[in-house]
Image (tube, rainbow, N blue to C red):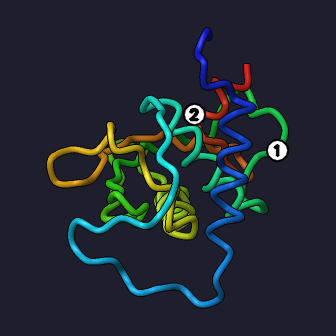
Amino acid sequence: MNSPFSLRSACLLACALALLGGCGGRPSAPLGEGSRPQQKQYNATADEYKVLVDQRVLAANRSGAVSDHLQPMLRSVVVVAFAVDRNGHLLSASVYRTNGDDEVENTALASLRRAAPLPPPPDALLDRNGQVQLMESWLFNSDGRFQLRTVATSAQ
């Protein structure tokens, strides 16, 4: 992949956003319509932004994430459709595709909610409603631990 936005740059940006997000004590109230937190704007493709989101989900769910390789025959693949507003707030999340395993469906949705707020998306990815619509696949081993498809495929 010959992208000027490397995986190392994505990791550094995710760390910086996580550090900045932890500053300031108690969380602030949601911002009004059209307002945006003071931050340096960055450019990223949808795939690069998904890597940032996935890194945040994995960081917030360390005990449930697969740190080594996925097993060859997966227990389940759960595809989740979700929307994020310009400030990184999770607006909606629902299972888009699954094999019917309720336990891992609930794990996928809970892991995404636990990671919120997510990194704010670049303005270029926002639709006219000020949000970005994404889909991601949770890949589950038989023990119930997961990896996210975008991160799993970018690490290869």
Between residues 150 and 76, which one lies in front from this camera angle? 150
Question: In the current view of this chain or complex, which residue is farthest to the left?
Answer: 128
Would you say 145 lies left or right of 88 here? right
Question: In the current view of this chain or complex, which residue is farthest to the right?
Answer: 68
Amino acid type at mark 1? Ser
Residue 56 position within the rendered picture, expressed as x and y whole percent measured from the top left: 62, 55
Between residues 45 and 152, which one lies in front from this camera angle? 45
Residue 71 position within the rendered picture, expressed as x and y whole percent measured from the top left: 75, 32
Residue identifier under label 1 = 67
Residue identifier under label 2 = 149
Residue 5 position within the rendered picture, expressed as x and y whole percent measured from the top left: 60, 25
- At horizontal 63% and vertical 44% (from top left) the residue drawn is 140
Q: Where does the C terminus fall, quadrant-wise?
A: top right
Between residues 5 and 109, which one lies in front from this camera angle? 5
Which disc is residue 133 wearing? none
Q: Where does the N terminus fall, quadrant-wise?
A: top right
Q: Quick check: can you spot residue 144?
A: no
Amino acid type at mark 2? Arg
- At horizontal 76% and vertical 46% (from top left) the residue drawn is 66
* Occupied quadrant, residue 89: bottom left
Above or below, 54 against 70 in this view is: below
Residue 8 position within the rendered picture, expressed as x and y whole percent measured from the top left: 75, 32
